[in-house]
Amino acid sequence: MLWTACSVALWTVAWIVHETVLVPRGWCVGSWSAGLYWTAAKIAVWIGPAIWLLRRAGENPVAATGLGTAQGLSRGLLIALAWLGIQALWSKVRGVWPPPESIGGYGAANAYVIAPVFEEFVFRGFALRRLRARGASFWPAALATSVAFGLLHVPGWLFMKGVSTGTLSLNNVTFSGNGYSSAPQGAIYLWTNTSALVMSNVIMWGDVAGPEIDNVGGAPVTITSSVIQGGCPSGSTCLGVITTDPLLGPLQDNGGPAHTQLPKAGSSAINAGYNPTCAATDQRGVPRPQGVNCDIGAVEVVLDRLFADNFDGRPTP
C-alpha cells in the first residue's frame, strides 16, 4: 500500500509539472519530446523505485521480476510490427499519408514496446511476484496489483480528460488542413463533456475528411458567426454559420510573426464577422474591423481602396 501511495503521488507530480510548467512554455508537446519526458518519468517513478527495493532486499531485478525467463518476446514484437503495418496500409488507403504519429511516432513505440515492458516489469514482475513471495495466493495478489495499476493511471486519466469544468473560447481562429493523430479527421476532437466549447468568428475549412468537430464526448458546443465546412457540426448549437468556401490563400508570409492564410477576394469570411465578439486585432496585429464588419478567421483583409482594380494582388471586398 505504501509503495502504491508513493507511486501515485509521484506520478501526480509528474503530470502537474507537465501541465503547469512544460506545456505552457511549449515544451514536451510534440510526439517525441513528450514521449521522452514520459519515458523518463516512468523510469523515475515506476522502474527506479522497484529496482531500488529489490536491490535493497539483495535480489537480482532481472531474476526477481522474471524477465530472465520471459518467453514469447520475439513473437510479440513480430505481431506488433505486423499490426503497425496493417494500420499504415489502412492509412494509405484512406489517403492519409504520411501516417499519423500514433502509427509512426512515439505513440506507436509507447503502445507496442515501452508501456507493455514497463508495466509488465512493475506490476506482474515486481508487485505480483513480491506478494506471492510473501505468501499471498494468486488471485488476491492479482487483484491487488490490478487495483494498483488502476490507481497509478488515475492522474493521467484525470488530466487527459480535463479536470477543469470551465469553458474554452475560440475567437477569430482559422482551422485548415488539420486532423488529430489517432484517426485523422476534422479540426477538433472532443472526447469528454467536462468543459464547454464556445466559438465565434472561426473558419473551419479544408481539414482532413470528416466532421470539423468530432464531439464523441457530448461536450456543449456553441458556434456563432463562423464559416464551417459541412455546416453546423452534430451536437452543436449554431447561429449564423456560413457554408460557402472562404477561399483561403496558401499558408505564407502575409506579415506578422507567423505565416497565415489570407482570404482571397470574394471570400465568404470577409466582412462577415460579428463585431461585438471580434478581436481588436488579427493574428498579425492589424486592427479590426477594416470594413463594416470584421472578417471571420485569424486574418483581417486590409481594404485596398486606392487600387480598387486589384492590380497589386490585394483583395478589395
Image (tube, rainbow, N blue to C red):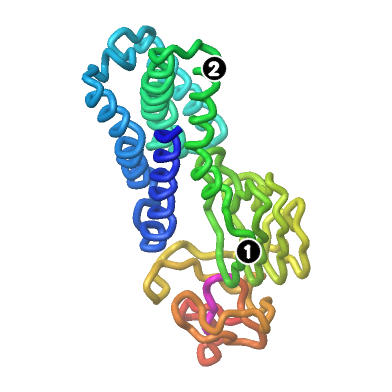
Q: Picture coordinates of residue 92 (x, y %)?
A: 50, 31
Which numbered disc, 1 or 2, marks the residue closer to the eye?
Answer: 2
Residue identified by numbered label 2? 140
* Element on which disc 1 rests: loop
Where residue 255 sits, quadrant-wise, is bottom left
Which residues, given as a range, are shown in magenta? 297-302
Q: Picture coordinates of residue 260 (x, y %)?
A: 46, 67
Residue identified by numbered label 1? 166
- Residue at (62, 81) in percent of width and height: 294
- Taking depth in this image into account, of 101 and 125 the one nearest to the observer is 125
Real-space Cα separation, disc 1 to disc 2, in angstroms: 41 Å
Above-or-below relation of 159 to 115: below
Where residue 132 sits, quadrant-wise, is top left
* Element on which disc 2 rests: helix
User: Is residue 298 covered in magenta?
Assistant: yes
User: Is residue 209 covered in magenta?
Assistant: no
